[in-house]
Image: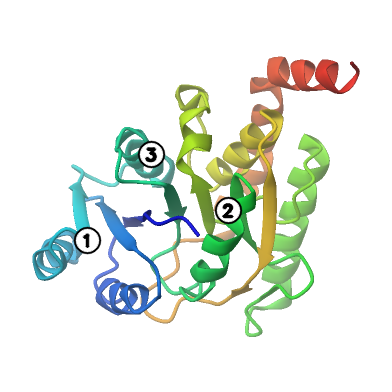
Amino acid sequence: MPSRITLVLPTYNEAENLPKLVSALFALPLQLNILVVDDNSPDGTGRLADELAAAHPGRIEVMHRSGKLGLSSAYLQAFHQLIERADVDAIAQMDCDFSHDPAVLVTMAERIETCDLVIGSRYIPGGSTDIHWPAWRKALSAFGNFYARAILSLPIRDVTGGYRLWRKSTLQAMPLERVKSSGYVFMVEMACLAHLLGSRIVETPIYFADRRWGKSKMSFRIQVEAALRVWQVLWHYRDLRRQAKAARGR
């Protein structure tokens, strides 16, 4: 498995979750570092991240941003920083609220040896969503994935999931300056871009749990907005789609 993984953790009001998650992550049998990207959380998450960094020198870094600038810009800013570093082999994405089981990262680290991107998937055999979710939320999530897959012709079952592990070299080869999506459609755009560039993508099953502490940032409006913006992704990468189609026809 990759010897050096850096996990990017975007945070906004995650003071309840961050110390518990750091403890769980550092208990894993991985050589793992963490980059916390905090958007000036009013609850003091950034200050707490600094304290954790001081308690774990060399293993935690904190990127402080001026305000709530969004999930996509947090990841992109972190990616741009990490792909330039020689001490990083792979870059992980994970929610900070325990929706993603930290233990699965071990399996993902094993699988990244033979591919370019591992996605923690709710929609392959063995994967599932929170048993306490209402039926409308499960249906909306499943439909959102089907909708994005169908429009973008993606062979990925969970295109909106945020639990991912990338080879650094894969991110280095991607035109990240072209990524324009905000919010959760960012996940769809990144998966689409990786597929169009021929990346080897595999999925591993996960159980997606509702957050243990704090308030969810997901809403019906956000999910509907993400579904509508999938069409923008389709148009934005029409050139790469043509190139990929031409390559398959040779």
Hey, what amino acid is under mark 2? Glu
Q: Is the Cβ of the residue at disc 1 closer than 8 Å to that at disc 2?
A: no
Residue at disc 3, secondary structure: helix
Farthest right residue? 249
- Which residue is found at the position 89% from the left and 16% from the top? 250
Question: Where is residue 245 drawn, in percent x and y?
Answer: 83, 21
Front residue of 64 and 172: 172
- Which residue is found at the position 65% from the left and 28% from the top? 232
Q: For marks 1 and 3, give the CA distance.
A: 17 Å
Front residue of 19 and 32: 32
Q: Nearer the viewer, mark 1 or mark 2?
A: 2
Hey, what amino acid is under mark 1? Arg
Q: Residues within 10 Å of mark 3 (few under 14, many from 20)?
A: some
The residue tagged 2 is 113
Question: Where is residue 83 drawn, in percent x and y?
Answer: 37, 36
Q: In which quarter of the view is residue 59 placed?
A: bottom left
Q: Is the Cβ of the residue at disc 3 closer than 8 Å to that at disc 2?
A: no
> Relative to residue 162, is residue 136 drawn left or right?
right
Q: For marks 1 and 2, give the CA distance.
A: 23 Å
Question: Where is residue 223 drawn, in percent x and y?
Answer: 61, 53
Quick one: label 1 or label 2, which is nearer the N terminus? Answer: 1
The residue tagged 3 is 79
Residue 59's disc is 1
Front residue of 86 and 158: 86
Q: How is the image coloured?
A: rainbow
226 shown above or below 123: above
Residue at disc 1, secondary structure: loop
74 shown above or below 42: above
Q: Is residue 41 visible?
A: no
Hey, what amino acid is under mark 3? Phe
Question: Where is residue 199 drawn, in percent x and y?
Answer: 66, 37
